[in-house]
Amino acid sequence: MAPSSPLRSRDFRLLAGGVAVSGLGSAMTPVALAFAVLDLGGSATQLGLVVAAFSAAEVVTILYGGVLGDRLPRPLLMQGSAAATAVSQAAVAVVLIAGHGSIWFLTTMGVVNGCLGAVAQPASNAMTRSTVTDEQLPRAVVLRSLASQTAFAVGFALAGVIVAVAGPGWAIAVDAATYAVAAVLFAMIRAAGTTTGARERVLAELADGAREVFRHSWLWLLIGQALLYHLFYGGAQGVLGPIVVGDAWGEQAWGWALSALMAGFVAGGLVALRWRPHHLLRWGLVLLSLTAAFPLAMALADDLTLVLAGAFVHGVGLQLFSVNWDLAIQENIAEDMLARVYSFDLVGSFVCRPIGYALTGPVAALVGTRAWLVVIAVVIGLSSLVALAAPSARQLTRRTAPVAAREPAVL
């Protein structure tokens, strides 16, 4: 194993393993949840509201999670979140398997699980840099993402089979078990993964994080683009996808579509191991525009193969962008601000999702499901290309090492 390989680090192996094993189960939950709601007689609008409740809880909690991630030992925060999620998902599984589920119950537990996941996500993202050397960091970002997305690909494929054969409750039971394993792995990490220093009030620390975001124009610009992207795309995958693909080709077909999406992520990760563009975001944004292929295929294709191909292309483009985006943050943000900056980045992905989920059903009913999927494809494709107009995003280059302290940003 080469000295520059992050796999030489025990802490990185535990981190990547914990993220991957929990991702395996988590990939099953969206599929299981969608069909659990539909099995209970829920409509597209009700499914959107259930998923929106989960996302809204993430938004409310995640900024506080960023503060905690810069205050507390990050492995401890991750361990506690994983253990609590294991318990809550086990409760959901038991209720569904026993046949006592309801849409209100799923909505309530979605809020609980959204909060539990969000409180540790910024710390989890920030941990990568604490488990490897500066030389190992670029490969560590790719390998962590590759491990996670491979697990998601397997999870999505299994989800369709388990839901079709045994029911949604059993798929969520697997998710509970994977979170329990992840909690054990996170508990074994020895790197503290956090900084020490004077603590301010939570709002003051959040304000410091916001100022750090606005010091880097490429950062706040692309967080803004993510708001628009997820406002539109979230409903395509979380609400319309299970209905359009499920109605045309069966419940298992939606699991395969999501599996193809994750396979695209894996393929993109393998490309990223070899391809290291000097300009981190320039080609990433071009490739991000390819994500329009998935909603476009769902809208226009009459063959499942084309839908799977669109999902695969979406995954490749999003993964290549995401790897370089993650590395840009890791290399340009100081350690004592990293979790808070990640929390603002995650809010950019999450804050508009509840609105998109809640509105997707009524809007699709008004203008037509397939017409709305075409609109979604146009918006997410063009917004990615428009972001290239910003020099700060187009010209951002790799660093030889991450910044050790806060420094003035070039606007």
Image (cartoon, rainbow, N blue to C red):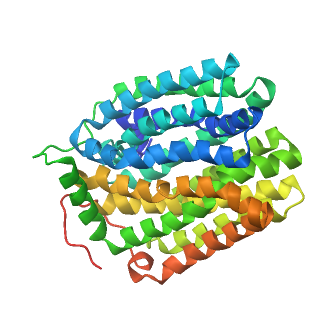
Near-viewer residue (381 or 285): 381
Q: Nearer the viewer, residue 114 or 53?
A: 53
Percent position of residue 113, x then y: 49, 34
Using residue 314 as the reference point, say whether residue 199 is left or right of it: left
Of residues 313 and 348, which is closer to you in this image?
A: 348
Q: Quadrant of the C terminus?
A: bottom left
Can you say whether 317 is above or below 151 in the image?
Answer: below
Q: Quadrant of residue 166?
A: top right
Q: How many marks?
A: 0
Q: Is residue 386 above or below residue 252?
A: below
Indicate the quadrant containing the N terminus: top left, top right, bottom left or bottom right: top left
Q: Is residue 206 visible?
A: yes
Give left or right: position of 206 versus 147. left
What is the x, y in percent for residue 307?
A: 80, 56
Which of the 4 image quadrants contains residue 12?
top left
User: Which quadrant would residue 216 be assigned to in this image?
Assistant: bottom left
Residue at left offset 85%, top offset 62%: 301
> Which residue is drawn at the image coordinates 57% and 36% (left, top)?
107
Query: Residue 182's x, y, as percent?
Result: 46, 28
Mark yes or no: residue 263 visible: no
